[in-house]
Amino acid sequence: MKYGIAIFPSKPIQDEANAYRKRYDSHYALIPPHITLKESFDADDDHINDLIVELKHIANATKPFSININKVSTFAPVTNTIYFKVEQTPELTELQKKMHEGKFENNMTHPFVPHITIAQNLLDDEYSDVFGTLNMSTFQFEDKIDRFQLQYQLDNGSWTVYETFVFGKEHI
């Protein structure tokens, strides 16, 4: 089965992202707005159970932290993807790093750029128009992050939460 690990921001950020996503993101119906900590990976039941134990340890050792979003950015010219740029913090970077070491396969295909996608798979003209407009807009979000989610992919391509890991909880 395919799994992934992500942070879902608060409802106000999700609502703002979805205002753009429902029009400009071809994956709108597949997953809510999120920050990817670990891209999709395959695991059988035994392996995922081992990883869940590890994820609980990571969550227990992590303190809640804040993220800030102040602008949009893009992955162009590689892809016509537009996103809310999440400011890099040591806490976020360290959390993401832990998802790629130890029992976890390092499946990173590119450097970690914390972001929340709001538009993707746009044609060149539409991309230029949308990015030009959004780039002139002001975005100001701060969000408290106190959990991450392990998700799995359904047969129809959508993602659903398998388990939520809250930061700083006592060991189970």
Image (tube, rainbow, N blue to C red):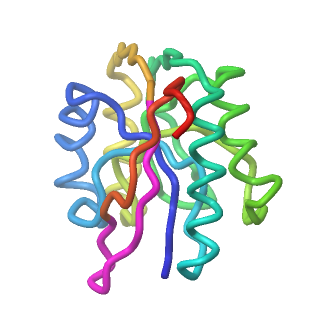
For residue 30, above or below residue 131: below
Tell me which segment is drawn in magenta. 147-159
Which residue is more in the foreground, 53 or 129? Answer: 53
Give x and y (percent) for residue 134: 34, 32
Which residue lies at the image location 64% right of the left edge and 73% below the top edge?
A: 47
Any part of residue 109 in sight: no
Residue 22, magenta (yes or no) = no
Q: Can you tell which quarter of the image residue 38 is in?
A: bottom right
- The outermost residue toward the front is 172
Secondary structure, magenta segment, majority class? strand
Q: Is residue 136 above or below residue 3?
A: above
Instruction: Pick whichever, 23 or 107, lies toward us.
Output: 107
Could you tell me which residue is drawn at 37 percent across and 66 percent down?
123
Q: Residue at x 73, y 43 (%)?
A: 98
Q: Is residue 116 left or right of residue 89?
A: left
Task: Find residue 155 and report its horizontal and vertical position in percent.
Answer: 31, 86
Residue 18 visible (yes or no): yes
User: Measured from the top left, where is residue 24 in percent x and y?
Assistant: 26, 55
